[in-house]
Image (cartoon, rainbow, N blue to C red):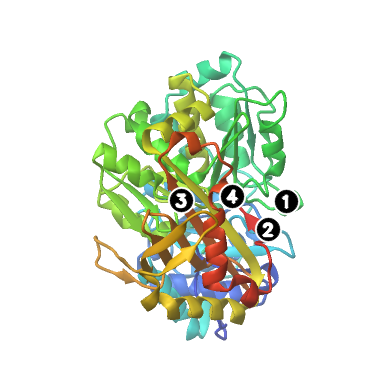
Amino acid sequence: MSITTVSTQAFAGQRPGTSGLRKKVTVFQQAGYLENFVQAIFDVVPELKGGTLVLGGDGRYHNRAAVQTILKMAAANGVAKVLVGQGALLSTPAVSCVIRKHGAVGGIVLSASHNPGGPDGDFGIKYNVTNGGPAPEKITEAIYTRTTNITEYHAYLAEDIDIESLGEYTLGGMQVVVIDPVSDYAELMESLFDFAAIRAWFASGKRMRFDAMCAASGPYATRIIEGLLGAPKGTVVNGVPLEDFGGLHPDPNPVYAEDLVSHLFAADSPDFGAASDGDADRNMILGRNFIVTPSDSLAVMAANATLIKGYAAGIAGVARSMPTSCAVDAVAKKLGLPCFETPTGWKFFGNLLDAGKVTLCGEESYGTGSGHVREKDGVWAVLFWLNLLAVTGKSVEEIVTAHWQTYGRHFYSRHDYEALDTDAANGLMAHLRAQLPTLAGQSFNGLSQQWAVALADDFAYDDSVDGSRSEKQGIRIIFTDGSRIVFRLSGTGTEGATLRVYLEKYEADTSQHAIPTQTALADLIVIAGQVAQITERSGREQPTVVT
Ligand code: VG1
Ligand code: CO
């Protein structure tokens, strides 16, 4: 066999963040950088030898080159079979679906998700385990440790494989199958949702706009929504994945998906709008003249789950990441469902889903999903909402405002301060931590009321399934009325540090529900700025992105 062993030197800083290792493309283009990380995966997961690996990514620049490198390394490391998405494409939820369906040992996702792409943009790599979900911290830490002392990697010497068309090849003793990225996933969606009802909804003249943001969701949305569900051509826009996402920022929020928002707020607006991110695991939901916050979307899904085919028998429980609003908690309480609060990042939901403790999970960062896979799933969430619209005959706005009437409204916003000086950001967090012992009991003056702190801590999570503990997951300040301010630093950025400030206020009084969100949160915004000394320490008067 023509296997070569290449000596290599460890690179500093290969510790995966919230969702894999993300760096500038140019960092990954250094000789050995990708190879070291991939070899560390093979070294840490010996089961891959003789097993099946799933491989694909969000279509961004450098994916194709990385796939060729990884295929050769997989062959040299004794992998029996690789299922690779045609054109190197597989959305993150599709990787999860394919791992589970085909009994693979794991998968490698090549994605930097919502980060911009192209030669000057970002690249990323993430390992998913046998349940289809992101590797838990125990494994990501082992991979990281291995990268710190790696001295060689293995590769099979061969020509590149044609991954642009479906086919089967052999690379040494390894079988390579280039698979259709959509078909397994589409079949799973059809098993969960009432496609006939959604088809009838479109046939009745209802209109939708799905913005795939020139990223991975395009082929999935086009095949399912325009194909299987009969929506008119043109329903999916920006549906062809481009290596630089057309120069756009594939982050589905009102700031970066502004074009979609303007369509939904125009005179002849469609009934329903949606967008997804780079790797198609996020979703944004819009109605005519209406934006649904992700935290509310999760709560609405939980409250209405039994109306949806795949969840008609009821859901076991719900989980949300700590900074996500407590809207879903209110639903769980009323329906008598268990409700879990986990650290940020989908990897923390895996154990709960595997143990059958929860069915629906969500994050404030436009991520929702269920036990059908082990990743958040953008197109799934959109189909869930479409199914809900179809079976209720209601509009998005009617569904959400009725939800608020029943459960109260959790006003919610996230303020991001991007690309801060890393020392300044760390200093800000240290300053917050230093105040923790004395914050509880203190009162802050708002514009119209006093805000007394009931609890302040650095969130730690004890996994009830495997007993692992994750500390320092975000500073939370909880006020006596349940309102919250949460501070944490992003674990997905590639430039300096990003401070995320999460703001939440509960309002039971229906007459107050139409207040603009930033107005409703005005007191908390001021208090957050004071407690964290945001302007003094960051030099910023305003956040870079408000969602
Ligand atoms: C962000 C979000 C988090 C999400 C993660 C991965 O992480 O806040 O909720 O799970 O991105 O999503 P951070 O550490 O930057 O806050 V994706 O779609 O980028 O894989
Ligand atoms: Co993503």
SS at mark 1 in the image: loop
SS at mark 4 in the image: helix
- Looking at numbered disc 4 in the image, what kind of residue is underneath it? Gln
Which residue is rendered at x = 36% and y = 69% of the image?
441
Q: Earlier in the sequence, mark 1 or mark 2?
A: 2
Where's residue 171, x and y in %?
53, 60
Q: Is mark 2 within 8 Å of ligand 1?
A: no
Q: Which residue is mark 3?
A: 505
Where's residue 351, x and y in %?
30, 57
Structural distance between the alpha carbons of marks 1 and 2: 7 Å
Q: Which residue is mark 2?
A: 116
**Which mark is nearer the camera, 3 or 1?**
3
- Looking at numbered disc 2 in the image, what kind of residue is underneath it? Pro
Q: Earlier in the sequence, mark 2 or mark 3?
A: 2
- Looking at numbered disc 3 in the image, what kind of residue is underneath it? Lys
Residues at badges 1 and 2 in contact (C-beta under 8 Å)? yes
Q: Which residue is mark 4?
A: 518
Which residue is rendered at x = 66% and y = 55% of the image?
60
